[in-house]
Image (spheres, rainbow, N blue to C red):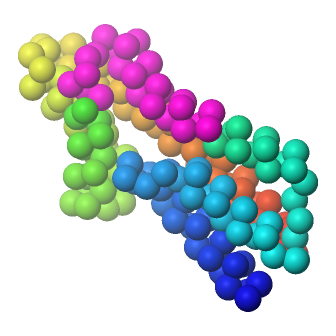
Amino acid sequence: MEIVWIILGAMCLLVGLAGCFLPALPGPPLAYVGMLLLHITDKVQFTVTQLIVWAILVIVVQVLDYFTPLIGTKYGGGSKWGNRGCIVGTVVGMFLFPPWGIILGPLVGAIVGELLGGKLTHEALKAGLGAFVGFLLGVVIKVSLCGYFIYEFVAALV
């Protein structure tokens, strides 16, 4: 049964890493579930402190993920249109133009969103770039945490 928990934990970590790029999947929480699945085996026992600190990190990262595009858009002079466009651009870009769509989709989506919201072209470019930078910052933070979980998972098994 332990092998099943380890395999499920590894799958949660991989899906969690994918969730760092896919807005529909909660990346860090899934990766944390993977760590919990490893913890319930007899092979590895994490401390209560580790589990609590990791849970707090996941919560903080999830909250930050909602605010980084907003902050980026705010500093870029954007609006809700830019944020919504950034999200739509991410999803559309991911499916239509992989792998570059994941990177370019949020930027193009934010610019198009701002243009649809009535911004002038130069304002839309600035706001779109701000939303894009905020989105990328959120992705980097999530990938860092999931990468750390993957490292801890592998190191605990080796």
Residue depicted at 61% across the width and 64% down the height: 13
Residue 41 pos. (x, y %):
81, 76
Taking 122 as reference, is 147 above or below it?
below
Q: Quadrant of residue 84?
A: top left
Taking 143 as reference, is 79 above or below it?
above
The residue range painted magenta reads 59-83
- For the question of whether residue 29 can be seen, the reply is yes
- For the question of whether residue 125 can be seen, the reply is no
Q: Quadrant of residue 56?
A: top right
**Residue 70 colored in magenta in the image:** yes
Residue 47 pos. (x, y %):
90, 54
Q: Is residue 118 left or right of residue 13?
A: left
Residue depicted at 50% across the width and 35% down the height: 65
Residue depicted at 21% across the width and 13% down the height: 123
Residue 135 pos. (x, y %):
42, 35
Across the whole image, how many numbered discs are drawn on residues?
0
Q: Is residue 123 left or right of residue 75?
A: left
Residue depicted at 22% across the width and 52% down the height: 92
Residue 101 pos. (x, y %):
30, 52
Q: Is residue 88 left or right of residue 46?
A: left
